[in-house]
Image: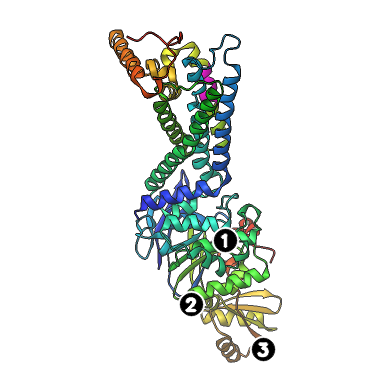
Amino acid sequence: MTTIARLTHAELRKLMASRTFLIGLALSAALAVISVAVNAAVAGKNGTPALGTTASTDKMLKLGSVCCVAMLVLGIIASGSEYRHKTIIPAVLVAPRRGGLITAKVIGIAVAGVVLSTPTFGLGLATVIAELSAHHIHHLPADTGTLFAGSVIAGTMFGMIGVALGYITRSTIAAIVGAVGWVLFAELAILHTLAPHLAKWLVTGAASTLTDPGALASRALTPATAVPPQEQERRQCTIRNQERSGPFTRRWHAGSADRPPFC
Amino acid sequence: MLNVDHLTKRYGPVAAVGGLSFEVGPGRVTGFLGPNGAGKTTTLRMLLGLAAPTSGTATINGVRYRDLRDPVRTVGAALDNDNFHPGRTAAEHLKIMATAAGISRRRPAQVLDMVGLTEAARRRVGGFSLGMRQRLTLAAALLGDPGVLILDEPLNGLDPDGIRWMRDLLRQLAGEGRTVLVSSHLLAEAAQTVQDVVVITRGRLAAEGSVAELTAATSTTRIRTPDTELLMSVLARQQITARLLAPGTVEARGADPDRVARIAAAASVVVLELTRHTENLEELFFDLTSDHTNDRALEVSPS
């Protein structure tokens, strides 16, 4: 076994040996289920899209942010607690060249990202299917699989950002408060509202591209919007045409008014 | 074999360690002594690659720590007794280290047994006493069955039974041919544990050698006599340093009692009592670091 493989194995052992990861996994899965249940409960009320419409289902499937925030916090804890509890000293004594340690930590948190994001999105998706089935609706948007993969990738990437923040900040608590505050308040609440043309370049903008069904369809938040409008229109047409022929849309109600006309 | 050669560490204008050189050989327990702020921990950190020296080298078997092919199997180090995640059990802590170092899965249980923590293997470290943490720190150092052990204050927090156990274990490990370097401020305890000492003060070497050699070199002869002035003058003529220790008592340095007795007899000096005074490790330490009275007061334990 190579040094990196051994160190990565040790990193995974560290994650499983403390309760933090398991608590994080349980919390994010619970949040995903609660988020879907709340969205389903308020669907069709106070001007929100009715249950079964693409807009409503898309809203319920916006689970990526749960994965991202959970992994951001876990990433910060994974690296920050090494300094907080001074476990970095035995770690460095085992692997004196720190490049290997950091690489193993990043790989470890990436694996943890997949392990956390998959059941989180999976449980959320199962709840969406259950809610829709209860209302005799048996279809899902064509890009559900892409959203699933996007949420896992975004969660993993946020975990890596968390690891970097944990290493460069002195206080784990301050790093968590600062990072979560930045993501949820500064970026999502302020920048996305006041300066959306800037927000797309930030981490939440990148994450939205992967986890937001609306952004996924229009690529509205990606830097790729810099391409000419005609090219954008062509891409959207391609996406919609793909949706029309996708396996999940075969049983789509013919009269669905919320779905835009195909190109 | 540990080799420190002209090791210097500067923090801005302050030299924590300045041109320190010493060697620690195998088969003996070596005490690394010095007042607070003498540079002991900084030196150990440089030996273990945790701090970069400003100049000089610190090597283990001729190789810098970061260049060791298999550090955990070469050097067992215990720098602090709170390098543990409080939420992990003792067994988990050692298993994580063993996994990272590629050590057998059975080894953690073996070292826990060696340090007497088998019963506590599945308990979270957060609930451990200071003595238990000290034992776990030693278990981690022994994980790779290394030939070199570097232990920072291993006697801290141990009860008398624990101190005796640690003393026996360190001697046993050294007896197996390992190199054992132990820093300690518990001089009375260290005196019973170590065979060699390296004493540093203000980042510089104050003394190096076996405890027996160093104490013998600093031994004195005390003479109780009514003719103190006459005795001091005849000793001075023989190039022997002498001083009036108390009224009626002269202390001669650098001459054994036999020689002093002959010189006194030749000069017809009345001698009432002649004794050899050998310093213990604590007195030796005070002598070597005597210009650091304030530091010393903080350093020496009540014991």
Which amino acid does the dot numbered 3 rest on?
Answer: Val
Cα–Cα gap, marks 2 and 1? 22 Å
Instruction: Out of B33 and A52, give the one closest to the viewer.
Output: A52
Disc 1 from disc 3: Cα separation: 61 Å
Instruction: Quote the CA–CA distance across marks 2 and 3.
Output: 49 Å
Q: Which residue is located at x 53 percent, y 81 percent? A: B237
Question: Image height check: is A128 above or below B198?
Answer: above
In this picture, which residue range is highlighted in magenta?
A181-189
Name the disc covering residue B175, or none: 2
Quick one: A56 or B247, which is closer to the camera?
A56
User: Toward which corner of the image does residue B80 lie, by quadrant?
Assistant: bottom right
Q: In this view, does B273 lie to the left or right of B205?
A: right
Sequence-wise, the earlier of marks 2 and 3 is: 2
| Lower sequence index among marks 1 and 3 | 1
Image coordinates for residue B241, horizontal then vertical, percent: 55, 76
Q: Would residue B279 be seen by someone viewing this image from the given angle?
A: yes
Same chain under badges 1 and 3? The reply is yes
**Residue denoted by label 3:** B270
Image depth: mark 1 or mark 3 in front: 1
What amino acid type should be assigned to the residue bearing mark 1? Answer: Leu
Whole-percent x, y for residue B120 in the image: 62, 61
Mark 2–mark 1 CB contact (< 8 Å): no
What residue sits right under mark 1 in the picture?
A: B136
